[in-house]
């Protein structure tokens, strides 16, 4: 038997192998203070196992009753066994081994506890710190939703570059996160397996690292979820799995800069002022025409201005009529109440839609009853047309839609006065109108062609107040009101109108009379006058597809309504100068051609828009299927209001000394406003994207948990991660077989085998680590092939006491410290 034994090392190996250095804990080189387990190969070439077993009286008894040293037991020849061993189980010396033979002489070359400043601990700590800090930054950015003014056209960073950088850092956070979470699981499970009296680890526990690295494994090996998912560590692993899967997506949704509508912010906007409101000289001078001034020095500018009035007024009126037609065709969707009827519309620059408001609304039926005649009183307010130019001024540094990849947008509401026009139309019969018609006077010499240019000399001049009428109180005529009534050359024929624009200061309106095509009223006289109103604010919404300019009027909750911010604003100051520019507008629209019965289409369509008359109650009401005459005239005057305010002040009146109310160099005025713009900003664009906040929050929290664990629990030291495949494989092949995995060698563990608890122990004689079932390690020794195996005794520690002082090796001492260490965090894992 002795001759058939073979050592694991050849003779040459014994000669060449360097003896391991002795270790003296007291700092003395004493032969009595050697490693308890290290063999001295120079002394009879005995293995450490032989020396220790000899000294402590331990050995292994074979079937013949002979006690053999451990080293010799490991080299028993296969000749004593009748079983034929496959070639792949034979030793290099040709001696077969059986599954029940275990080579205990396998001392660990390295310690399980790595140095604090070695590569692995430092790398894990740096990655944990990086993942925690940057995931926290991403979470803060997602919550704060900052706006990135330096991103996009005109900024220092292109939008595509910003998104690329955001995705890059999100990916690095994700990679670092996965690494530290897997390392955290490995450290927790390895420490649990090494710690004495712990509950050990299971195969399903060790599979948790695969959840994070390969989320699909949860579907393939779903049984592991059954045993580990509901544990504290399993919940952390599940959270880490979903965070790892969705972190880049969450960062793209909530952190990556994208165009979105920002919050409403109060601001100050500056705009240029060129001339007073409704200045006819300025409007005529800035009118663009190729006709040189030398060709027509007298009428060149006024002709150009009239053409501009014609183009804009007809366009606005046609669009408004189209809207009316669509509503009427839709089964009478209009109303007999002015506030519910179509609002006035206009346009600017061919890409800006202007929407006005009806203000100072009065009840037409009540007025008709009070005065015994038709009284159609309309006041229309339009937004201040100077706001768009002010918002686009570079001084305000507001990003325009074309500067945000063509997808920009902003909303501005300005606290500025709004231009308003009042059209008052009153029904009259021929006798009531006669005092104002020259051709009906005694000794009248009416000439239709020359009346407007050379009015008759027998018309009384100032200071005469002319004739009184039954409508003086309605229009404010006479000395009581300080206004002279208009004088018209003759009575208009059906569907024609005649103008009077000759009123002298302080006359603040132009007038027209017309004859409708219906019997009641017989004639109608209208006044048109303008003012600045403070009951509105101006809204401007700009996008790459177009813009909207609208008035927001008579809203008590509107803090930007101009008179709310300027209590000194005086309402109802009708401009006497405005009638000068209104004269050009009325002449351009041929509203006075009825003096020669020219049958202009403008006059005809306006005279067909009479309110509905009720003969039973002798009252007039708005026709739900047709605009009224005053509404039509007001909409036509909308273009005049826009031109009047494009370069006008943003306050009431004229607060400059430059004559004649035109500045040689434009000056800036400021006004209060609110701004809400589409800009590049972090944060979700849809409400449902808020679910990704959960991912960002858990990414930060779990990263912080891993970092705290590395600092507080691990204290910078890393234990060998026995859940890593290479480490687990090396540990398993050097460990005894277990009946707990009976039948799992081919198809793998299943069922309850996945929840079997395993612990890692050390055979201190050889400083050899092994893994074994916790039930087997804590129970009676296993018997292999009818023999009792005492090679692996769980976490049993063997202190050799033979009367001499023997010091344990650093590896054994390290194992004892690691396995006995307790901390308040250990209770959680």
Image (tube, rainbow, N blue to C red):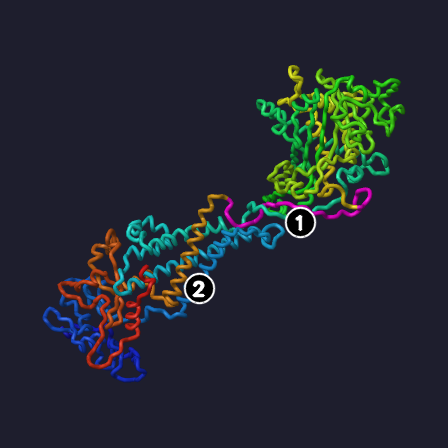
Image quadrant in which the N terminus is located: bottom left
In the rendered structure, does residue 676 fall within the stretch colored magenta? yes
Q: Position of residue 464 (x, y in %)?
A: 86, 27
Identify the residue at horizontal 63%, vertical 39% (top origin): 546
Image quarter (top left, top right, bottom left or bottom right) of the C terminus: bottom left
Position of 230 relative to 545 (above/below) = below
What element does badge 2 sit on? helix
Q: Mark 2, residues whose alpha carbon is within 10 Å: few (<14), some, or many (≥20)?
A: some
| Highlighted range, magenta | 657-685
Mark 1, other Cα within 10 Å: few <14 / some 14–19 / many ≥20: some
Residue assigned mark 1: 396
Residue under the point 68% across and 24% down: 367
Q: Position of residue 620 (x, y in %)?
A: 66, 20
Residue 763 visible to the viewer: yes
Residue that badge 2 annotates: 126
Depth check, front residue: 725 or 453: 453
Q: Residue furthest front?
A: 480
Magenta: main secondary structure equals: strand
Q: Where's residue 655, x and y in %?
A: 76, 45
Q: Which quadrant holds residue 769? A: bottom left
What label does residue 2 carry, if any?
A: none
Q: Is residue 733 visible?
A: no
Displayed quadrant of residue 497: top right
């Amino acid at each position: 038997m002795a001759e058939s034994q073979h050592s694991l090392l050849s003779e040459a190996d014994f000669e060449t192998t360097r003896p391991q250095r002795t270790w003296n804990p007291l700092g003395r080189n004493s032969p009595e203070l050697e490693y308890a387990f290290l063999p001295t190969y120079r002394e009879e070439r005995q293995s450490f196992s032989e020396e220790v077993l000899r000294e402590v009286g331990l050995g292994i008894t074979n079937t013949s009753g002979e006690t053999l040293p451990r080293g010799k037991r490991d080299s028993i020849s296969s000749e004593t066994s009748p079983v034929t061993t496959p070639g792949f189980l034979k030793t290099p010396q040709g001696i077969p081994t059986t599954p029940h033979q275990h080579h205990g002489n396998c001392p660990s070359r390295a310690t399980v506890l790595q140095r604090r400043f070695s590569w692995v601990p430092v790398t894990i700590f740096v990655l944990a710190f990086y993942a925690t800090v940057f995931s926290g930054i991403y979470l803060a950015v997602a919550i704060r939703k900052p706006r990135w003014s330096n991103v996009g056209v005109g900024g220092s960073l292109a939008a595509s570059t910003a998104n690329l950088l955001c995705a890059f850092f999100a990916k690095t956070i994700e990679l670092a996160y996965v690494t530290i979470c897997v390392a955290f699981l490995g450290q927790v499970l390895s420490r649990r397996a090494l710690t004495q009296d712990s509950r050990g680890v299971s195969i399903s526990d060790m599979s948790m690292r695969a959840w994070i690295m390969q989320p699909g494994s949860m579907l393939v090996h779903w049984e592991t979820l059954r045993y580990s998912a509901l544990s504290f560590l399993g919940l952390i692993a599940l959270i880490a799995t979903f965070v790892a899967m969705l972190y880049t997506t969450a960062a793209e949704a909530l952190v990556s800069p994208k165009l979105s509508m920002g919050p409403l912010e109060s601001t100050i906007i500056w705009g240029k002022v060129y001339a007073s409101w409704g200045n006819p000289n300025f409007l005529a001078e800035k009118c663009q025409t190729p006709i040189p001034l030398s060709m027509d020095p007298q009428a060149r500018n006024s002709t150009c201005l009239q053409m501009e009035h014609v183009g804009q007024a007809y366009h606005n009126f046609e669009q408004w009529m189209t809207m009316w037609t669509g509503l009427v065709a839709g089964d009478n969707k209009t109303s007999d109440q002015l506030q519910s009827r179509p609002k006035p519309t206009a346009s600017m620059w061919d890409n800006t839609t202007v929407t006005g408001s009806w203000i100072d609304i009065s009840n037409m039926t009540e007025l008709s009853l009070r005065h015994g005649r038709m009284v159609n009183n309309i006041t229309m307010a339009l937004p201040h047309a100077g706001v768009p130019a002010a918002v686009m001024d570079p001084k305000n540094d507001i990003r325009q839609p074309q500067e945000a990849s063509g997808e920009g947008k902003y909303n501005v509401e300005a606290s500025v006065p709004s231009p308003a026009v009042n059209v008052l139309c009153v029904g009259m019969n021929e006798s009531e109108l006669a005092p104002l018609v020259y051709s009906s006077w005694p000794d009248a010499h009416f000439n239709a062609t020359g009346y407007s240019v050379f009015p008759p000399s027998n018309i009384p001049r100032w200071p005469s107040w002319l004739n009184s009428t039954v409508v003086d109180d309605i229009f404010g005529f006479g000395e009581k009101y300080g206004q002279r009534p208009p004088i018209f050359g003759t009575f208009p024929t059906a569907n024609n109108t005649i103008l009077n624009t000759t009123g002298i200061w302080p006359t603040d309106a132009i007038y027209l009379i017309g004859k409708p095509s219906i019997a009641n009223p017989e004639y109608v006289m209208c006044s048109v006058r303008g003012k600045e109103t403070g009951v509105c604010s101006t809204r401007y919404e700009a996008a790459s597809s177009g813009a909207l300019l609208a008035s927001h009027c008579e809203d008590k909750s509107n803090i930007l309504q101009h008179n709310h911010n300027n209590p000194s604003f005086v309402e109802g100051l009708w401009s006497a100068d405005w009638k000068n520019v209104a004269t050009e507008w009325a002449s351009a629209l041929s509203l006075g051609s009825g003096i020669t019965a020219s049958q202009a289409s403008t006059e005809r369509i306006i005279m067909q828009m009479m309110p509905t008359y009720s003969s039973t109650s002798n009252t007039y009401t708005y026709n739900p299927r047709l605009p009224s005459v005053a509404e039509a005239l007001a909409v036509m005057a909308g273009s005049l209001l826009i031109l009047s305010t494009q370069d006008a002040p943003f306050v009431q009146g004229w607060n400059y000394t430059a004559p004649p109310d035109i500045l040689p160099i434009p000056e800036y005025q400021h006004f209060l406003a609110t701004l809400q713009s589409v800009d590049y900003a972090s944060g979700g664009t849809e409400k449902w994207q808020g679910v990704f906040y959960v991912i960002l929050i858990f990414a930060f929290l779990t990263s912080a948990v891993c970092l705290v664990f590395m600092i507080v629990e691990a204290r910078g030291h890393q234990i060998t991660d026995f859940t890593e495949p290479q480490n687990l494989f090396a540990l398993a092949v050097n460990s005894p077989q277990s009946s707990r995995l009976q039948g799992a060698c081919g198809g793998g563990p299943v069922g309850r085998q996945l929840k079997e608890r395993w612990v890692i122990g050390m055979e201190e004689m050889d400083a050899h680590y092994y893994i074994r079932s916790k039930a087997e390690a804590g129970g009676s020794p296993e018997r292999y092939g009818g023999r009792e195996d005492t090679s692996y005794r769980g976490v049993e520690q063997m202190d050799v006491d033979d009367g001499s002082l023997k010091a344990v090796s650093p590896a054994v001492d390290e194992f004892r410290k690691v396995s006995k260490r307790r901390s308040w965090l250990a209770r959680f894992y």
